Image: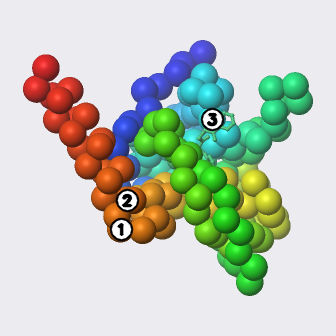
Amino acid sequence: MAVRPILIIPDARLRAIAEPVEEINDEITTLVKDMFDTMYAAPGIGLAAPQVGVLKRVVVIDLAKEDESPDPIVMINPEVIEFGDETVVTEEGCLSIPDLYYEVERPADIKVRYMDQDGKVVERKASDRLAICMQHEIDHLDGVLYIDYLSRLKRDRVIKKFDKAAKRATAN
Ligand code: K1U
Ligand code: ZN
């Protein structure tokens, strides 16, 4: 079991564009395993590789509740290939912006294409929490955070709070 540290804003790696995975080798297999360990330990329902400082297009998700059996999803080089017309407003959180939750509006239904851990190309439709979580995680691969969808006032307030905390941490 290897739990990796989760990066917190304003770490610049959370704003970088992650590179596509060219080959599913041992490095990627270990990364996926560590990402699940890290996500379950947090706990969270999703995690993108840049959140553990690896700028590769890898996402893990598990929406199963504590009393349900695990339902792990691995998405390598994921893309949203269709957005539905309807939108929903749901509360989101982010392990890289801890202890805050805000409502965000996103497309309710999407179709995604990705490679699974065996390198098989998967196309699937998603709705409800899965669609929201997939969009949140795929955004991470492009350096986009859910706070980017808030009003400028709310977003700037969040950024300021974490900038201050980071400055305090480096001063000590
Ligand atoms: O990517 C991340 O930072 C993980 C994030 C995923 C996410 C949450 C909500 C909406 C969209 C995407 C989290 O997992 S935050 C923690 C969380 O939501 C949660 C934690 C424990 C139980 C249930 C939910
Ligand atoms: Zn996040």
Q: Residues within 10 Å of mark 2 (few under 14, many from 20)?
A: some
Label 3: state its secondary structure: loop
The residue depicted at 75 percent of the width and 54 percent of the height is 129
**Which mark is drawn over residue 152?**
1
Q: Residues within 10 Å of mark 3 (few under 14, many from 20)?
A: some
- Disc 3: residue Cβ within 8 A of ligand 1's nearest atom: yes
Report the residue marked by disc 3.
Answer: 44
Q: Earlier in the sequence, mark 3 or mark 2?
A: 3
**Which mark is drawn over residue 30?**
none
Amino acid type assigned to the residue bearing label 1 in the image: Arg
Using residue 97 as the reference point, say whether residue 44 is left or right of it. Answer: right
Cβ atoms under marks 1 and 2 closer than 8 Å: yes
- Nearest to the observer: residue 153 or residue 111: 153
Q: Residues within 10 Å of mark 1 (few under 14, many from 20)?
A: few
Using residue 92 as the reference point, say whether residue 7 is left or right of it. Answer: left
Depth check, mark 3 against mark 2: the one in front is 2
Answer above or below: position of 81 versus 124. below
Answer above or below: position of 168 versus 84. above
Residue at the extreme left? 171
x and y, in percent, of residue 10 in the image: 29, 46
Residue at the extreme bottom? 85
Amino acid type assigned to the residue bearing label 2 in the image: Arg
Report the residue marked by disc 2.
Answer: 155
Amino acid type assigned to the residue bearing label 3 in the image: Gly
The residue depicted at 63 percent of the width and 53 percent of the height is 91
Asked whether residue 142 appears in the rendered view, the answer is no
